[in-house]
Image: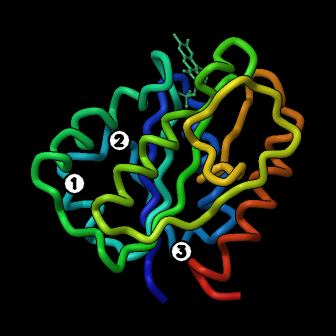
Amino acid sequence: MAKVGIFYGSTSGITEEIAIKLREKLGEDICDIYSMEEDFDEYDQLLDYDYLLLGCSTWGAGEVQNDWREPLFEMELDKPDFTGKTIALFGAGDQVDHGTEFVSALGKMYEHFNKLGATLVGEFPNEGYDFQYSSALLNDKFVGLPIDEVNQSEKTEERISQWVDSIRPIFIGS
Ligand SMILES: Cc1cc2nc3c(=O)[nH]c(=O)nc-3n(C[C@H](O)[C@H](O)[C@H](O)COP(=O)(O)O)c2cc1C
């Protein structure tokens, strides 16, 4: 069975917690997990996997979490080929205090890896959220799993389970 690489950038630990739960649910034996801060040296590490779960919270005003900035920049210059790679995105945000760019980092990640040829999967319904704008919406669905632990922590577990159920057949078969 193909291994899944989980790579996450997380400043205050929320996206990290999601990453750990995703690994538990998909199976610790098939998922390798990497902190972008501690375990990441070069983007070739991403290319070691055909199946990737990429986690990135949103900071600034709709910007990717700090540890993703340099790797994304380097990939923009070098344009590595992600054709044949399947990627699903997840990440934390705050729809109340930052509702003008809710989880917009996911939109940036989507655009980035889409341009490099990856197949992006793992959309999530835009239901139960209340925000003004997000660049992570495509045809009124999120391009990945948005978690708002600040305002809707009671929905986190269910959202993760729902998302894992939707991507499991693609990542590890039914
Ligand atoms: C200065 C600052 C800027 C932020 N900007 C955004 C933003 O643009 N969009 C958003 O959805 N959340 C924003 N957030 C909220 C964080 O994404 C949220 O706290 C998230 O849970 C952090 O996840 P992490 O611990 O995985 O980094 C911001 C938070 C701070 C403190």
- Residue 98 placement (x, y as % from top left): 64, 16
Question: SS of the residue at dot 2?
Answer: loop
Residue 125 lies, with reference to residue 68, above or below; the image says below
- In the rendering, which numbered label is found on residue 146? none
Q: Which is more N-terminal, label 2 or label 1?
A: 2
Residue at 44% across, 65% down: 52
Amino acid carrying mark 3 in the image: Asp
In the image, taking residue 83 as reference, residue 52 lies left or right, namely right
Report the mark closest to the observer, 2 or 3. 2
Q: Is residue 40 above or below residue 135?
A: below
Q: Earlier in the sequence, mark 1 or mark 3?
A: 3
Please give the name of the residue rendered at 52% of the width and 42% of the height, measured from the top-left corner: 106
In the rendered image, the residue lying farthest to the front is: 139
Q: Which amino acid type is shown beneath numbered disc 2?
A: Met
**Residue 43, which numbered label?**
1
The vertical placement of 99 against 167, above or below, is above
Q: Position of residue 78 (x, y in %)?
A: 10, 53
Q: Is residue 113 visible?
A: yes
Q: How many marks?
A: 3
Q: CA distance from mark 1 to mark 2?
A: 10 Å
Q: Is residue 135 left or right of residue 18?
A: left
For label 3, the residue is 29
Q: Position of residue 93 (x, y in %)?
A: 63, 28
Cα separation between marks 1 and 3: 23 Å
Residue 34's spot in the image, x, y percent?
39, 51
The verdict on label 1 being within 8 Å of ligand 1 is no
Query: Marks 2 and 1: in contact by CB < 8 Å?
Result: no
